[in-house]
Amino acid sequence: MTSNKLPKPAEDFSEWYNQVIQRAELADYAPVRGCMVVRPYGWAIWENIQSALDGRFKATGHVNAAFPLFIPMSFLEKEKEHVEGFSPELAVVTIGGGQQLEEPLVVRPTSETIIGHMYAKWIQSYRDLPVLINQWANVVRWEMRTRLFLRTLEFYWQEGHTAHETAEEAEAETRRMLDVYEDFAVNEAAVPVIKGLKSDSEKFAGAVRSYTIEAMMGDTRALQSGTSHNLGQNFAKAFEIQYLDRNNELQYCWTTSWGLSTRFVGAIIMTHGDEQGLVLPPRLAPIQIVTVPIFRSEEEKSRVMEMTGKVQDMLSGFRIKVDDRLELTPGFKFNDWELRGVPLRLEIGPKDVENNAVTAARRDIAGREGKTSISMENLGQQISDLLDSVQKNIYDKAVAFREAHTHSPKDYAELQEAILSGWALSLWCGSADCETRIKEDTKATIRCIPLEQDGAGGACVYCGKKAEKKAIFSRAY
């Protein structure tokens, strides 16, 4: 007989992750290998992510548009580094309408090329700049190893693409959007992240500089959770994105791109989840509060359901659901909503009615310690405070976990040991050779060179040569 219990994440994190996604009905496997079907509960999380980000994008002056799914192959070939970086992952259409196409079409892996082509048409003068456009879209990358949400052939994301007059403006935009991603991750998803610069070997194909937010998952691996790229004039020169400057001279634009995808749903699962299943941050949870009425007789039912209706009305400003399934026991319902990560459960039984109160159970604190009786008086404010407390607590837990598993090795032997149980924050000389050798030995990559440095230089952890900055080395998804 198969156990209904989830695998313990400490024992089999990968299987725990896969089972949580399917049992909580976030996503399922599609008939095409490497693709996923995002189920309504999973999509609701993504919709809340979209809303939180979209508001931030619009507040910083960006507007939304939509660009085609198909890109002429010749467009990708215009930017050499770009096509080399993406060629192993391309899905290419060669037949359309039963006819061989004159030119193959690429199913977009990203949209710098097609958007660059359009910007070349739209931008004529410095008066047209800056152009600040974002699109919400699906993209296709032919990944060989796939995992739900983290790495699939087709996934959903937003991609921002901007054009500017100067190199300074482009760099400022690149860093501003990195800050937007950090703000979203910390304040909406309760996921602590490190902002940093990618090494040249890890940067986006065609970029001058790539910045990232890196998060530590529950198994101590790193997850690249959002990226922002300064493209310099590479794509502008490839696609002739030019403008007449203030002296009436023709100049190339400076461009950026930045993106965050459905893999962030995976980040939330793996940062906060526990042995019972999901633990969702209240600000992104599809259901913030679930109410479970408890009764044994018709007389009790009448009083309990009347109180449940009052609670529903009083908390109408929250995302709240009443679990009135009669065929299931309260215990089954408790476990079901814990699996789904609902931040707060309100139990309403005959004693609660007598006391004019509800029993609140927090998802982030197990057992009796997480339960409290709340008076119906000023219920909305008390629930709001409780949800804020859950949000803060799961963030603080994640920060403490990351700090406990981030090591500062003094030499290469210590680095190799550190990578087995977390992140290694070590001095690196900047040599690609050192980076490659560390990766070959440990399977760890440079996740980023943190933007915040302590300023203390020293010897490279691998070769011993002079090093100015520290880098985070870690195994990653």
Image (cartoon, grey):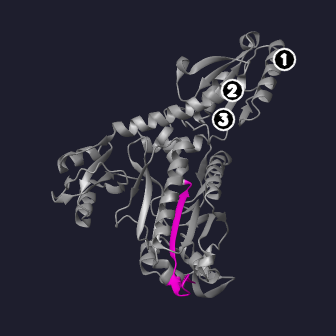
Residue 93 part of the magenta-drawn span: no
Q: In this view, does 195 lie above or below 1?
A: below
Residue 445 in the figure: left or right of residue 87:
left
Residue beneath disc 2? 381
Q: How far apart are marks 2 and 1 (CA)?
A: 27 Å
> 10 Å neighbourhood of mark 3: few (<14), some, or many (≥20)?
many
Q: What element carries label 2?
A: helix
Q: Name the outermost residue toward the left.
A: 464
Cα distance between the residues tagged 2 and 3: 14 Å
Position in image of residue 326 (x %, y %):
76, 26
Task: Tell me residue 422's x, y (percent).
Answer: 33, 43
The stretch in magenta equals 238-262
Badge 2 crowding class, 10 Å Cα cut-off, few under 14, some 14 to 19, many 20 or more, is: few
The circle drawn on residue 247 is none
Q: Tell me which numbered mark, 3 or 1, is placed earlier along the sequence.
A: 3
Question: Which sits earlier in the primary sequence, circle 2 or circle 3?
Answer: 3
Please state which amino acid type lies under the numbered disc 1: Ser
Residue sitting at 46 percent across and 72 percent down? 167
Q: Residue at x 80, y 24 (%)?
A: 310
Mark 3 vs mark 1, CA separation in Å = 25 Å
Answer yes or no: is residue 96 visible.
yes
- Give the quarter of the image for residue 306: top right
User: What secondary structure is found at the residue carrying circle 1?
Assistant: helix
Which residue, given by chain and number where applicable, does mark 3 sit on?
Answer: 288
Indicate which disc, 2 or 1, sits on the residue closer to the N terminus: 1
Q: In which quarter of the image is residue 61?
A: bottom right
Label for residue 302? 1
Q: What element carries label 3?
A: loop
